[in-house]
Image (cartoon, rainbow, N blue to C red):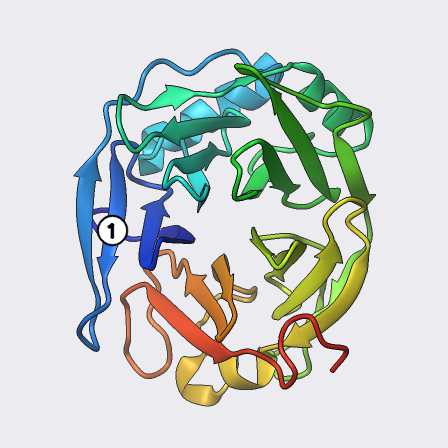
């Protein structure tokens, strides 16, 4: 990956795809045929971003950050529908770029009430804590977005012809508070509850909860949590630890056999010397993702 910083994963018709929050003009197809995967960059011709309703102060802070580090659009998630169309979420713009199977990329026309409702519920208020995950149903007419933290939450919008609307309301869940990091984390401390990515599988939403080192299954209509699985014991073994005092998991794919979890290591090196972006594979829980154990 040109800029590193893997920030999203999607499984589309048997192929894994990825995005980087540093590369505005590239969509990555992952060649998983060898133990060390290769990322093939697919060029994107991205049109100007539409107005989303985010205030000028937030947008200007995002622009200043991108000037320093690169990645003005700050892609923080990718998903795809059954037809193979890709959808990339831009955190800095609270916008979704559709990359169709045929034709040019285009920004979805999203009703500005989505951002208004989210902000009224306490989300999308803070710099670098905006939208951090995306999922779409197979039919390609319902989207879910995850607000990262302070407050974290889940948003849902539906397509009506060419425009995406809130329906009875965009906000499924808005949640404040802090949570203690797992005991395996060196110098564990309380951090804001967060969402790092979303996945849709078997009609359920799955949230990647970065600082808690877990995956949770949630009701797709209410966002209420049904079951969680921790991956802290495997992720925080001594060789796999990073110096950063927080979780680095940024990307999630769920399938019948298990979960793919991608790390954005921000250029950091873990204890065993590995400094490339890493994707972990976890087996599905006994009884499958729909079970109670």
Place of residue 2 in the rendered image (x, y in percent of width and height, measured from the top left): 20, 47
| Horizontal relation, residue 111 to residue 235: left or right | right
Q: Quadrant of the C terminus?
A: bottom right
Task: Report the number of discs.
Answer: 1
Q: Residue at x 80, y 26 (%)?
A: 169
Viewer-closest of 293 and 84: 84
Q: Is residue 62 shown above or below 6?
A: above
Q: Is residue 192 visible?
A: no
Place of residue 244 in the rendered image (x, y in percent of width and height, measured from the top left): 49, 66
Callout 1: helix, strand or loop? Answer: strand
Q: Quadrant of residue 218?
A: bottom right
| Horizontal relation, residue 267 to residue 165: left or right | left
Viewer-closest of 24 and 142: 142
Q: Residue at x 65, y 14 (%)?
A: 112
Place of residue 7 in the rendered image (x, y in percent of width and height, measured from the top left): 41, 50
Q: Residue at x 78, y 39 (%)?
A: 172
Place of residue 214 in the rendered image (x, y in percent of width and height, measured from the top left): 63, 70
Q: Is residue 291 shown above or below 72?
A: below
Q: Is residue 102 shown above or below 249?
A: above
| Horizontal relation, residue 113 to residue 86: left or right | right
Viewer-closest of 244 and 216: 216
| Horizontal relation, residue 165 to residue 221: left or right | left
Q: Quadrant of residue 83?
A: top left
Crowding at mark 1 (Cα within 10 Å: few <14, some 14-19, many 20+): some
Q: Is residue 161 visible?
A: yes
Q: Residue at x 42, y 81 (%)?
A: 240
**Residue pointed to by mark 1:** 29
């Amino acid at each position: 990956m040109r800029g590193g910083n893997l920030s999203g994963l999607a499984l589309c018709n048997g192929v894994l795809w990825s995005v980087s929050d540093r590369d505005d003009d590239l969509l990555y197809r992952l060649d998983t045929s060898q133990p060390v995967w290769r990322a093939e960059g697919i060029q994107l011709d991205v049109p100007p971003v539409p107005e989303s309703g985010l205030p000028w102060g937030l947008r200007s802070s995002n622009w200043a950050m991108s000037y320093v580090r690169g990645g003005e659009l700050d892609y923080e998630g990718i998903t795809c529908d059954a037809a193979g169309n890709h959808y990339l979420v831009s955190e800095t713009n609270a916008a979704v770029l559709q990359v169709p199977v045929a034709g040019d990329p285009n920004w979805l026309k999203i009703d500005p009430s989505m951002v208004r409702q989210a902000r009224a519920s306490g989300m999308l208020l803070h710099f670098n804590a905006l939208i951090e995950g995306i999922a779409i149903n197979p039919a390609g007419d319902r989207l879910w977005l995850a607000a990262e933290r302070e407050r974290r939450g889940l948003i849902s919008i539906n397509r009506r012809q060419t425009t995406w609307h809130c329906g009875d309301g965009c906000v499924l869940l808005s949640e404040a508070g802090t949570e203690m990091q797992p005991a395996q984390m060196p110098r564990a401390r309380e951090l804001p509850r967060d969402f790092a990515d979303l996945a849709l599988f078997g009609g359920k939403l799955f949230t990647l909860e970065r600082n808690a080192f877990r995956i949770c299954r949630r009701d797709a209509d209410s966002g209420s949590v049904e079951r969680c699985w921790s991956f802290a014991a495997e992720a925080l073994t001594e060789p796999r630890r990073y110096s950063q005092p927080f979780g680095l998991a940024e990307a999630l794919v769920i399938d019948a056999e298990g979960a793919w979890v991608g790390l954005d290591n921000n250029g950091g090196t873990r204890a065993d010397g590995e400094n490339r972006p890493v994707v972990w594979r976890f087996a599905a829980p006994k009884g499958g993702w729909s079970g109670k154990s």
